[in-house]
Structure formats: structure tokens, C-alpha cells
Image (tube, rainbow, N blue to C red):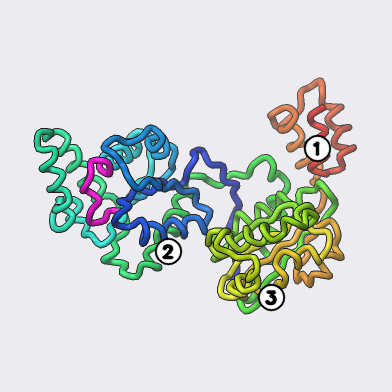
Amino acid sequence: MACFSSSSFTTRTLRKKYDVFLSFRGVDTRNSFTSHLYLAFSQNSIETFIDDQLNRGDEISPSLLNAIRESEIAVIIFSQGYASSKWWLEELIEILKCKKMYGQIVISIFYHVDPSDVRNQTENFGVAFSKLEERFKERPDMLQRWRNSLSEAANLSGFDSYVIWSEPILIQKIVEDILKRLNDIFPIEVGIDLVGIESCIEEIESLLSYSSEAIYTLGIWGIGGISKTTLARAIFNKFSNHFDGSCFLQNVREECERNSGLPQLQREILSRLLGVESMSIDIPNINSHFRRLSQRKVLITFDDVTHPDQVESLVHRLDWFMPGSLIIITTRNKQVLQNCGVKSIYEMKELKNADSLKLFNWHAFKQDYPNMDYEELSNKVLQYAQGVLLAIKVLRCF
């Protein structure tokens, strides 16, 4: 049995623009290890800054400096030629500065180099550094700064390709470590918009214990404005890291009504699930691309479905997917879920009075309780809203 469970749920609010800043020497790894690692980050929704410039001068651009400072984690890929240019070493110094000043996490990856060679600038890694020493022999202070930075970075926890020799496994371990660190950075806190939904998440978690030999389907239904999408998004965010690919399709009804845009939307779906560029997916052979999903365990959420044909028009058949995949459908019509053959159906209920009051007060007064002059009016508003989240949010404006 496969079971996706956890003690609590978190909404992740990024404080910085990027999750990861990738520092690497393009000539060494751009079209090999770095591109594979970047793709793995993208597939796991890790927002990554990667510099696509092929030619660099000696000075780091302000935009690149900002990208380093706006990243929670810096990943340094030490390759044999990393120390061959002033650029890379100045970038390293800036990363270590952010570590010291802002608590930025720095992870070293030793790709076909030994950590001790980076630390001491020896062997092939040292050959590249010696060429730089010759160029800047009149600047011993600068050379010493670079040596100190290389030594400091080599002493940080990281990953060694000589220890984990399989590149796919190495990348998998790096991704798992990054995800864990990001979860630690953004602690578990229930956002105000998830008030009253925590119990729903727990109830759905109890449903998500199923055989990995089958495709699991979950339906969430209820009246409009009752937070079906919020709940589905919470479930999606919580479990997406357990799958090979994931895709959240919001407003399916509206997307399908734009019938001319369906091929492009299918491209985007396949791009997210397969982890490839959307333009590499040719429309005439779209079915062959969907068949590739039989080898991938995926999570897809179809939000606001009004007819079973809408799901079919987007992915053709749900049995394309690999056993162990999870399909979530939200709708206002329970019959839609039954016609789609959904195995587990969860009915979304109105918020309880206590949760309605807390949510309304936060939206209207930015606190847990109403202003004294508005207490009676607040109670009347909640009676009128009857626990419907959208109504509460709209009425608080008045």
C-alpha cells in the first residue's frame, strides 16, 4: 500500500524571488550535469536562477548580484575548470558573503573533482587556478581571498560525484536535500485562507491510502465559493513532491470553452508532466506523447469541471497514466464525478460558525475579533453568508 501522509499542512510563501541560485562553469557542465539538475529542479517546482550567458567579462553584473541575494539557497557546482576565471571566484565570494550576512544556505557539489583538491587548489582543479595566479600575480591580496573562499566552500556539506557515482541518483539526492531545506526555511503555518480547511485536509489524507497498482481518483464537490479550489490546491501542494510530474489545471470549464486553445493547453500539460519544453511537443503526434505518461507517476488536478467531456478533451483518457498516479477533480456537480468514474468523493461543507467568525474578522479587521461597534453587524453578516467562504470575503469589503 502507498500512503501519502503527514502530520500537518503548510502553505509556502516565498520571501525571496528564487529558491536556488546555480553557480557553475558553463563550458564544463552547462550541456550535461547542470542542465539535468536544472530540469530536475523545474520538475519539482524549485524556482531556480540559471545564468544563460555564454560569454562573461571579469565583472559581475548587478542583475546577477541581485539574483544571488534574492535566492534562499546557492548551489555551487565545482568542476575542473571552475577556478579558471576571476568571474566564478568573485561569484563564489558574493555567495559566501550572503551566507554570512543573510544566512543563505550554500551547498557544494564536487563534480568530477575531489573536495580536497578544491580546498587546496591541487591536481586538475589546481591547474586551472594556477593559470589565474599567473594573470593576477601582482594582486596577492585578491589571490588569497579566492584561496580562502575555495577552502571555505570545500568545507561545507555537499555532494561528491566520486561517492555517488550514478548521476541520476546524485541528482535525486540533491533534489531531496533542497526540498527538505526549503521546507525547513518555510515552517508549517496555516494561512488565514486555510482556516476551517485543516480538518478537510486531514479527512482527505485518510482517503489517500491506496494500492500503487491502480490510478487513484479523488473528487471534491460542493456549491460555488465554498473553497473547493483552495482545498484542492492545498492537497496538490502537499503531495506534488511525491510524483514524477504534477500539473494543476485551474478553471477547466473556461479553458475548454476556448476550444481553439486546447492544443496549446495540452502542450502545457504534457510539458509539466514530462518535464520537457512545450515547443518540443508536436501537436499532430500528441497521443504518442500522452502514451509516454504510462511510465510516469503523476499528480493532476482538474479544477471546476462541469462535464466529463472536459477532462477527456484535455487528456483523452485517464488510463494513460502510470499506476500510483493521483487524479483530483473539483466540481459543483456530484454526477460529474460519478460519470468520470471517480473512486473517492469528498463533499465540501460550509465553514463552522467559529471558523467563519475568525476568517471574517481577519479579512475585515485584521484581527481575531471584531471592533466593538461592529460586533452585531458582523454576526448578521455571518448569518447571511452561511459559512460560504466567497461570500465572507466579498461581504467583508462593505
Q: Residue at x 46, y 54 (%)?
A: 180
Is the residue 55 above or below the residue 274 in the image? Answer: above
Residue under label 2? 172
Q: Is residue 397 above or below residue 18?
A: above
In the rendered image, the quadrant that contains the C terminus is top right
Q: Residue at x 36, y 61 (%)?
A: 33
Q: Nearer the viewer, mark 1 or mark 3?
A: 3
Q: Find disc 1 in the rendering and name its residue.
A: 392
The residue lying toward the viewer, choosing from 192 and 39, is: 39
Q: Position of residue 8 (x, y in %)?
A: 60, 53
Residue 309 picture quarter: bottom right
Gap in angstroms between the C-alphas marked 2 and 1: 44 Å
**SS category of the residue bearing label 1:** helix
In the displayed structure image, the side of residue 346 where residue 265 appears, left or right: left
Instruction: Name the kind of residue labelled 3 in the image.
Output: Asp
Residue 319, disc: 3
Q: Residues within 10 Å of mark 1 (few under 14, many from 20)?
A: many
Is residue 303 rendered magenta in the image? no
Q: Is residue 11 visible?
A: yes
Mark 2 Cα-neighbour bin, 10 Å: few <14, some 14–19, many ≥20: some
**Does 85 appear in magenta?**
yes
Per the model, the C-alpha gap separating discs 2 and 3 is 27 Å
Amino acid type of the residue tagged 2 in the rendering: Gln
Query: Sequence order check: which comes first, mark 1 or mark 3?
Result: 3
- The residue type indicated by label 1 comes to Ile
Q: Determine the residue positioned at 53% across, 62% down.
A: 275
User: Tag 3's secondary structure?
Assistant: helix
Q: Going by the image, does 384 lie left or right of 340?
A: right
- Please state which of residues 215 and 184 is positioned toward the viewer in this rendering: 215
Q: Which residues are magenta?
A: 78-89
